[in-house]
Every structure is written in C-alpha cells, then in structure tokens.
Image: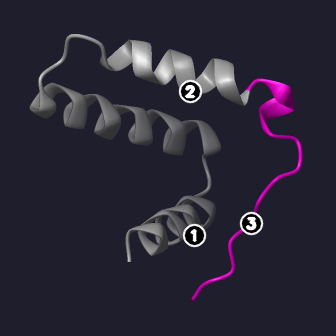
C-alpha cells in the first residue's frame, strides 16, 4: 500500500469549516451535477498547485483510498 501523508495542521484547525463548505456546495445538485462539481474542483486545485508531479502523486494517493 502506498505511503499516505497526513498533515498535522489539519487545515489550520478549519477542517470542519472546509468540509461544511464542500457539503453546502453540493446541496440541491443531482448526482451528475455533484460529479461535475467535483471534477471542476479537482482541476481548479490542480491548477492552483501548478506542479504536474505533485498532482499526479496526489491522484495516486486518492485512488489508493478507493482500493
């Protein structure tokens, strides 16, 4: 199993706020609309990260949670 990095900062103590905002962003959307929102969010975050190797590593790590 790949190594998983857990950051102790926990979103600077605002993890619950981020989770709540994510849930709110999905309110009232169909399943297809939620999937599209998630895809856009991933692409926006990848663009913000700006490093293809880092994004690739994060995608591999995220995929490992599904296995």
Left or right relative to 43: residue 61: right
The one nearer the camera, 43 or 3, is 3
- Of tags 1 and 2, the one toward the viewer is 2
SS class, disc 2? helix
- Mark 3: which secondary structure? loop
Q: Tell me which label, 3 or 1, sits earlier in the chain.
A: 3
Place residue 57 in its image quadrant: bottom right
Residue 67: % across, % down: 38, 77
Residue 1 shown left or right of residue 32 in the figure = right
**Residue bearing mark 1:** 57
Residue pictured at 21% horizontal, 10% vertical: 28
Tell me which numbered mark, 2 or 3, is placed earlier along the sequence.
3
**Image point (22%, 37%), residue name:** 35
Q: Which residue is mark 2?
A: 19
Counting labels gives 3
Report if the CB atoms under discs 3 and 1 are less than 8 Å apart. Answer: no
Badge 1 element = helix
Q: Is residue 5 left or right of residue 17?
A: right
Q: Is residue 28 left or right of residue 6?
A: left
State how far apart marks 1 and 2 are (Cα).
22 Å
Q: Is residue 20 magenta?
A: no
**Quick check: 29 above or below 2?**
above
Which residues fall within the magenta stretch? 1-14
Q: Position of residue 22 (x, y in %)?
A: 47, 23
Tell me the quadrant of the picture where the N terminus can be found: bottom right
């Amino acid at each position: 199993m790949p190594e998983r990095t857990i950051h102790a900062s926990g979103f600077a103590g605002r993890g619950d706020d981020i989770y709540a905002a994510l849930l709110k962003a999905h309110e009232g959307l169909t399943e297809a609309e939620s999937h599209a929102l998630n895809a856009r969010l991933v692409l926006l975050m990848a663009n913000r990260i700006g490093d293809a190797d880092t994004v690739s590593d994060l995608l591999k790590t995220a995929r490992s949670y599904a296995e």
